[in-house]
Amino acid sequence: MITFLSGGTGTPKLLRGFMKVTDRHEIAVIVNTAEDIWISGNHISPDIDTVMYLFSGVLNTDTWWGLRDDTFTTHDEALRLGIDEFITIGDRDRAVHIARGKMLQNGMRLTNVTKVLCERFGVRETVLPMTDTEVTTQIRTDLGLIHFQEYWIKAKGALDIREVVRASAEPPKTTEEVLAEIAASDTVVIGPSNPITSILPILECDGIVKALKEKRVIAVSPFIGDSPVSGPAAALMLAKGYEPSSKGTLDCYGGIVDVFVQDIRDPVEVKGSVRLDTLMTDEDKSIALARDILRVATGP
């Protein structure tokens, strides 16, 4: 059994490779939910949906979000009617958000909602939200405190970051399901996702770090030099007081990592790291990296 910590698009690209080289029933994914948001009365869980759509074979891998060949009639009409729907939501994708929102409003845990949706999409892997507690990553800017989605999508990441804030009504606690998957795993892989907005929210859930310390943990850096492969990770790392680099990424994970993987092109030296080609520009590259990580996972 191999468990992944995932968010954004970096780790899903790695998962695309692992789907081809290992038993899919042996894959579990613990997913960031701090970017979840209610939009137009419906609940979007973007990182869960990306993983769920990937595993069911319907993900739009041109954008790495949403459903392939989706239409946007409802979104376009909502904009025409003056609704500030700043996230472009496909029609079929919206149906998933409606279903999730209804189940949550009926009192179901997000863990159970995710299980129901994955079953309906025919997903063979185990997909778990990091917590059932509602947690939100917020960005403090000169305009005030805004949801991460507003910063990244609505403002296109163009605002200066003053602070990264994690907001929740109560301290987030992980679930028994998550702890059971970690306990059953031979290896845990922290994928090449944004350390601040994708991975740290998972690690901040009570119970996660303690469980990971009992396991062999492999972390893959999302940085090459001082630039992430994609997304706003550099600015967010600086806002949290970390160097935007592979070294800063390892520091961010606070001593839980047994094997640290960085790209063969990365000029930053991290003592003891394993160097692999981590640029997953197509499916073959994802498969090659997955095979390399499996070799590392089964090594000494």
Image (tube, grey):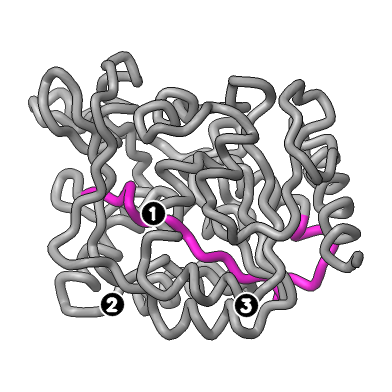
Numbered badge on residue 284: none
The residue that mark 1 highlights is 201
**Residue at 83%, 48% in the rendered image:** 287
Residue at the spot 37% in from the left edge and 40% down from the top edge: 90
The magenta segment is 18-37
Q: Position of residue 158 (x, y in %)?
A: 32, 14
- Residue 109: which disc? 2
Residue at (51, 45) in percent of width and height: 252
Q: CA distance from mark 1 to mark 3?
A: 20 Å
Name the amino acid, label 1: Pro
Residue 272 placement (x, y as % from top left): 81, 45
Helix, strand, or loop for circle 1? helix
Residue hosting label 3: 214
Give the distance between the C-alpha atoms of the residues marked 1 and 2, in whole angstroms.
Answer: 18 Å
* Residue 68 in view in this figure: no
Q: Residues within 10 Å of mark 3 (few under 14, many from 20)?
A: few
Tell me which amino acid carries mark 2.
Arg
Could you tell me how many numbered marks the image carries?
3
Q: Secondary structure at mark 3?
A: loop
Task: Please state, as top left, top right, bottom left or bottom right, where the N terminus lies in the image.
Answer: bottom right
| Image-quadrant location for residue 147 | top left
Q: Is residue 293 above or below residue 297?
A: above
Decide whether residue 118 is among the magenta residues: no
Q: Kindly check if marks 1 and 3 are in contact, taking CB atoms under 8 A apart as contact.
A: no
Residue 83 appears in the rendering: yes
Q: CA distance from mark 2 to mark 3?
A: 27 Å
Q: Earlier in the sequence, mark 2 or mark 3?
A: 2
| Residue 127 pos. (x, y %) | 52, 69
Q: Measured from the top left, where is residue 294 in percent x and y?
A: 85, 60
Q: Amino acid at mark 3?
A: Glu
